[in-house]
Image (spheres, coloured by chain):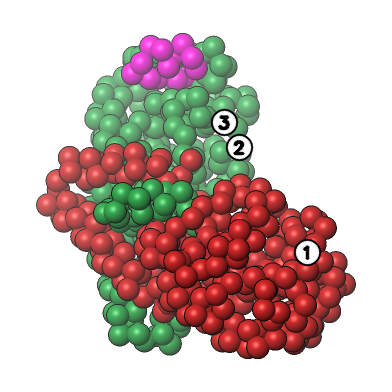
Chain colours: A green, B red
Amino acid sequence: MKIGIVGMGLIGGSLALEFGDRGHEIWGVSRKESTCEAAIAQNVVSHASTELSSLSEVELVVLCPPIPAVLPTLEKLVQVLAPEAIVTDVASVKAPIVAKATELWPNFVGGHPMAGTTESGLQAAHRGLFTGASYVLTPISSTSPRAIEGVRSLLATLDVDLLSATPEAHDIAVAAISHAPVFVSASAIAAASSISDEATLKLAQMLASSGFRDTSRIGGGNSELGTAMAKFNREEVLRSLQIYRDCLNDCIAWIDREDWDSLRDFLDDQKQSRSDFVV
Amino acid sequence: MKIGIVGMGLIGGSLALEFGDRGHEIWGVSRKESTCEAAIAQNVVSHASTELSSLSEVELVVLCPPIPAVLPTLEKLVQVLAPEAIVTDVASVKAPIVAKATELWPNFVGGHPMAGTTESGLQAAHRGLFTGASYVLTPISSTSPRAIEGVRSLLATLDVDLLSATPEAHDIAVAAISHAPVFVSASAIAAASSISDEATLKLAQMLASSGFRDTSRIGGGNSELGTAMAKFNREEVLRSLQIYRDCLNDCIAWIDREDWDSLRDFLDDQKQSRSDFVV
């Protein structure tokens, strides 16, 4: 199959490698000429161009640009695509994208692979990024069944857990487990950084070990991505952060009034709950 | 040297292994007979007993029981110790312990190795746990210089970064980078678990990946330890959580009024700040 990949960063590049390994012909598109050259030189794609018009003959396109660029890119892409072509995306926000994208192109199917690393860009792309990961598709009632089947059968060749959800359920779920935690985690860095005594701050920086490393990891990531998550999934991120603040306020109140039994019960509950999220 | 280890869990057991490797004779004490038997069977210690009186001839004791048991254990221990014996502890809270412990035993030096794993207990003890870790000593003006030198020269044989701080500065620093993050992290689990729609909650549980795993790790740990941190370092943990809540409220306000520039600047600042804490 001729597959177009628009945006050859971590996700786009890694998908290109996987699809290429399975015998597909990969047509990459990047805004940057240098990325096109690197993608060809590293055998990530067979063809690369800065022009969407290069995709006029592909059968399926995966849109992998930053979240804010998905719809603007699709608007241009539909002007050059073959009428039968199927389009999917990988954005971590679905409701605001899927409705408009399906209007623009009925053969659009929203998608979101739950994979990432701290690194980004083509140089971080690698085989195996998606191995064992969940990959959510978010078709809606107006999505073409042929498009769903086309995306599903392609992704079934990867070693992923293929799931289906409404765009709305997807956005609520990722607000809780991925988007809101960015701000939870970033605030932990901000709080630690606000130690006013210089020597004590230096001590804290020296003492920070694996616990702080893990808690602060996603808060110290790509600021454009974090901002886009909040902007495009604003309502659900806000709702999730407000619930989060209520939980935190409970902790603060228990500690303040020295209610150690309630605090211990809360921690016990979370230890138990976490095992439902994390194997 | 004859070294006593009271409490043969993760930290006590791992110290016993390291000190034993360096030719010291290790005398272990545990409340449980089964732990004593296991410690002997696994060659973690040379001698093991459930009685503190077994330590009457050791030259140095490391107290490694749960935080609430450090002072009660020391009160009993001082009744059997040789007058010259040096005592140190490994508790993650220092101010409330060091002052009283030094009154009980002037040869007491507070200590805190910044090492841990998700596992606990003797079966989790292993060589290398402290390799490259920071190890803080918190002497006060009434601490005997000979005791400081005794603990320091023993720990200098481990591959640790040996630091010195006041108990107060230590407690402020660990509140920010270790204790408060337990409740930050636990609240993230609680918020995610509170998704009211059952199917969406199940979806969130399936989609949770490395980001949620890391952010939630220390919140899903030992509830006794988390509660003891809050109880014994209450004032600093509260102060740290209140600062944390202010940072979180800023995030919520920026998202609420769609001030994406401020949100992005905040995330950029935290990315930068994190590099001062985590190499």
Residue A76 lies in quadrant: top left
Residue A36 lies in quadrant: top left
| Residue at disc 3, secondary structure | loop
For the point 39% across and 68% down, which residue is it?
A: B183
What crowding class fits label 2: few (fewer than 14 Cα within 10 Å), some (14-19), or many (20 or more)?
some
For the residue pair A161 and B263, the one nearer the viewer reads as: B263
- Residue B270 visible in image: yes
Residue B236 is situated, as x and y percent measured from the top left of the image, at 34, 69
| Residue at disc 2, secondary structure | loop
Residue under circle 2?
A: A128
For the residue pair A24 and A69, the one nearer the viewer reads as: A69
Q: Quadrant of the N terminus of chain B?
A: bottom right
Q: Which mark is residue A126?
A: 3
| Residue at disc 1, secondary structure | loop
Residue B276 is situated, as x and y percent measured from the top left of the image, at 40, 42
Q: Chain of mark 2?
A: A
Q: Which mark is residue A35?
A: none
- Residue B90 visible in image: no
Q: Which residues are magenta?
A: A27-39
- Closer to viewer: mark 3 or mark 1: 1
Q: How many marks?
A: 3
Q: Is residue A156 left or right of residue A47?
A: right
**Mark 3 touches mark 2? (CB < 8 Å):** yes
Residue B42 is situated, as x and y percent measured from the top left of the image, at 85, 68
For the point 41% across and 40% down, which residue is it?
A: B275
Q: Which mark is residue B1?
A: 1
Inter-mark Cα distance, 2 to 1 = 51 Å
**Residue A139: within the magenta?**
no
For the point 67% across and 78% down, which residue is it?
A: B83
For the point 30% across and 85% down, which residue is it?
A: A257
For badge 2, the amino acid type reads: Gly
